[in-house]
Amino acid sequence: MSKQQLQQAVQEQPGYSTWLPFCQLLPKVELHAHLNGCVRASTVRELVHSQQLSSLSEADIERITSTGHRSLADCFVLFDAVHQLTTKHDTITRITREVIEDFAAEQTTYLELRTTPKDRPEHGISKRSYMAAVLAGIQQARQAQPAAGMLVKLLLSIDRRNDAAAAMDTVALAIELMPAGVVGVDLSGNPSVGSWATWLPALQHARQAGLKVTLHAAEVANYEETHAMLDFAPERLCHMCVLDEALQQRLWASNIPVELCLTSNVKTNSVPGYVDHHFKQFYAACHPVVLCTDDSGVFGTTLSQEYAIAAASFGLEQQQLIELAARAVEYCFCSEQEKQRLRQQVLDFREAWQ
Ligand code: 6MZ
């Protein structure tokens, strides 16, 4: 479809499917993607069959690869099932390469991939060897098109199931791997598990070492914890679905960018539906937001789809979508020089579409 045909299509019928081709061409940055949540459905099936796992039933596989609704609690059961499949260094390298290829294929110019380093002695995996396998996947992806031109950085996730020592270990590894492209630390995992005070020392240590911090916050109602997270003032926050008036005012005053994952929040029933998503309020209040996928495999989405859904659900126009993509660059954890290159890619696109 030519540029003129696309422009005409979105003016005449501004729905999701008419926006999608435009959003696929838009240079985008992905700031919230969990490695094991982004595994391709076809790879999940292949791994199940090649590993002949008796612990995973056909029903489990159906649940992992189906893209329907599931509760947030159920999601964490699914992630553990995916983790049963990614127990070899080769597999971790492969899924990393595939995830990078998938993002690159839809004009993602920058990917901040996050993953939880895992100690799995029963499989001969340590946190350090797990990360070496991830780095090998990034290296493989760099050697081939279409991912060769995409910038990839890493965030190491602290799982809310981790105790203080495990969180500190992850941060020590993140610091050691800064020269290899680790730019930050994330706190994620089941929001109903654990307590903030456990991970705070590790997060403070990360910050002192020059790592950026992003926190999964308010994915479920936990006002006290969300206040404590705002006190910490991370560089970015994720989700922020359940806020009371006081928290909302604090968030807006803080100006901390929020990673918003529309499909993830809708499919886990964290929000009632796309048009009710808090993107609308945040955007209207000019609060900094960035559209992200979260778990493209588990939720069956892509970054282009998230932009197209936002356009269709909130009545955004072409220039507003370009502006969203442009502003997202400012929230990346990469260097100023790298941001300059990403800014230029959006500028070039804007010029070509005027
Ligand atoms: C909180 C999530 C998440 O790290 O093994 N994760 N944590 N909320 C979410 N919303 C749906 N989606 C994914 O990738 C999978 C892990 O990412 C976190 C969970 O800890 C999950 O086990 P990695 O690569």
Image: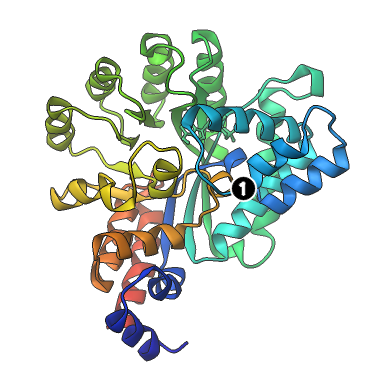
The quadrant the C terminus occupies is bottom left
- Left or right: 325 with respect to 141? left
Residue shown at 64%/57% (left/top)?
Answer: 142
- Left or right: 15 with respect to 68? left
Identify the residue under disc 1. Answer: 66
Q: Position of residue 301 (x, y in %)?
A: 51, 54
Residue shown at 57%/44% (left/top)?
Answer: 298
Q: Position of residue 348 (x, y in %)?
A: 35, 75
Q: Position of residue 123 (x, y in %)?
A: 80, 24
- Left or right: 65 with respect to 109? right
Residue shown at 64%/40% (left/top)?
Answer: 63
Helix or strand or loop: what does disc 1 sit on?
loop
User: Is residue 36 positioned above or below 200 on the image?
Assistant: below
Depth check: give the residue in front, 104 or 21. Answer: 21
Q: Position of residue 43 (x, y in %)?
A: 73, 49
Mark 1: give few (<14), some (14-19) or many (20+) Cα within 10 Å.
Answer: some
Residue shown at 59%/48% (left/top)?
Answer: 297
Q: What is the quadrant of residue 49 in the picture?
A: top right
Q: Amino acid at mark 1?
A: Ser
